[in-house]
């Protein structure tokens, strides 16, 4: 397993993590047995990073991980554990970065996880009623209280990262980043590298488009998120399947699963880039893990760029309502 450093002065961490939204979240719930089988397989493969959030299944994802810790004494000390808060169920205030709210949310997460601290605590969505400096100060106090060892943000602009970092070291920033979503290359990946911040890439296989088994149109229409997402509605869906068919053909020519090639491409973008795919299926996990074993040559990357050039995807990555919260910066 390839290893990297978390942030500028954090621990060594596998350059591949498991995103636990797949256990409970946008794409349905996993059973206890399914989620624990994935976690067991990750442990066996040397994956040392688990990423979850309080909103994934309204705490169910955290509870499943907590039960896994309970069933495997000592495993907590082997992993870098991350969770997030800041998204609410209040329609009047969807995002809340108030100091008391973030600390209360973290306390509740710790209880569900059955631990006394996490290794990374993220602000899941930046609340613009606070300045980045104020939120950075709040996060610093949570570190000082011993409730988290490091902190991060999700879906923020490079300018917000720089401002928050004046009050607290920001170990990691999460952003959607893949061959289908290249926006982080317009400033975020560079700012993270300059500041020694790890860029944690979620949805690294393009919400299944970059796999050998992309969601069928019927399945996409059965899930709340993809049902209205611009990339999964026609005519965009059909165009995106046609575009990624070229990628699947390339992967087959190279003798690799498409998902492995997508993961390998991300890891090749820099030692500070850490993909966190999610899955309920150990067979799919094996395809994803295969990407950590590949070393793409310059020629390999050129072939990938030829079949999926920058800007190939049809449709925005979010609807207007889904864009509420994430920061646009280009």
Image (cartoon, rainbow, N blue to C red):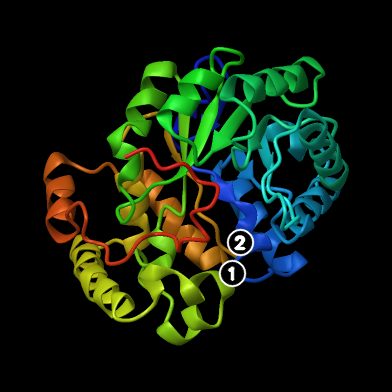
In the image, is residue 163 above or below residue 250? above
* Label 2 packing within 10 angstroms: few (<14), some (14-19), many (20+): many
* Residue 151 spot, x, y in % from top left: 63, 27
- Residue labelled with disc 2: 22
Q: Which residue is mark 1?
A: 27
Q: Position of residue 54 (x, y in %)?
A: 74, 49
Tag nearer the camera, 2 or 1? 1
Q: How many marks?
A: 2
Dot label at residue 204: none
Cα gap from disc 2 to disc 1, whole angstroms: 7 Å
Q: Position of residue 69 (x, y in %)?
A: 80, 45
Instruction: Name the foreground residue: 148 vs 91.
Output: 91
Toward the viewer: 225 or 88?
88
The image shows residue 314, relative to residue 154, as above or below, that is: below
Q: Is residue 112 above or below residue 10?
A: below
Q: Pointers 2 and 1 in contact (CB under 8 A)? A: yes
Taking the image as shown, residue 282 lies to the left or right of residue 206, namely right
Q: Identify the image quadrant of the C terminus.
A: top left
Please tell me which residue lies in front, 73 or 183. 183
Crowding near the residue tagged with mark 1, few <14, some 14–19, many ≥20 C-alpha atoms within 10 Å: some
Residue 110: image location, x then y, percent: 83, 39
At numbered mark 2, what does the secondary structure look like: helix, strand or loop?
helix
């Amino acid at each position: 397993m390839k290893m990297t450093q978390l942030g500028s002065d954090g621990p060594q961490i596998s350059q591949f993590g498991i995103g636990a939204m797949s256990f409970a979240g946008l794409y349905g719930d996993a059973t206890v047995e399914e989620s624990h089988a994935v976690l067991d397989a990750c442990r066996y493969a040397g994956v040392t990073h688990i990423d979850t959030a309080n909103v994934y299944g309204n705490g169910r994802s955290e509870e499943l991980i907590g039960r896994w810790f309970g069933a495997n004494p000592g495993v907590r000390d082997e992993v870098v554990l991350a969770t997030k808060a800041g998204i609410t169920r209040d329609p009047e205030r969807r995002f809340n970065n108030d100091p008391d709210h973030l600390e209360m949310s973290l306390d509740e997460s710790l209880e569900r996880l059955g631990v006394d601290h996490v290794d990374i605590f993220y602000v899941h969505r930046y609340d613009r009623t606070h300045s980045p400096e104020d939120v950075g100060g709040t996060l610093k106090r949570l570190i000082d209280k011993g409730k988290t060892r490091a902190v991060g943000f999700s879906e923020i602009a490079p300018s917000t990262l720089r401002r928050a970092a004046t009050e607290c070291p920001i170990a990691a920033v999460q952003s959607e980043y893949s061959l289908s979503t290249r926006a982080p290359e317009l400033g975020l990946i560079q700012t993270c590298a300059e500041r020694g911040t790890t860029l944690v890439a979620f949805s690294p296989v393009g919400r299944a488009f970059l796999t050998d088994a992309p969601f069928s149109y019927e399945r996409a229409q059965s899930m709340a998120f993809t049902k209205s997402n611009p990339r999964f509605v026609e005519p965009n869906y059909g165009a995106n399947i046609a575009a990624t068919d070229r990628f699947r053909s390339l992967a087959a020519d190279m003798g690799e699963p498409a998902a492995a090639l997508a993961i390998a491409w991300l890891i090749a973008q820099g030692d500070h880039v850490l993909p966190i795919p999610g899955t309920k299926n150990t067979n799919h996990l094996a395809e994803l893990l295969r990407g950590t074993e590949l070393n793409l040559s310059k020629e390999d990357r050129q072939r990938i760029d030829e079949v999926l050039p920058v800007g190939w995807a049809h449709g925005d990555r979010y609807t207007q309502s889904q864009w509420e919260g994430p920061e646009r910066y280009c």
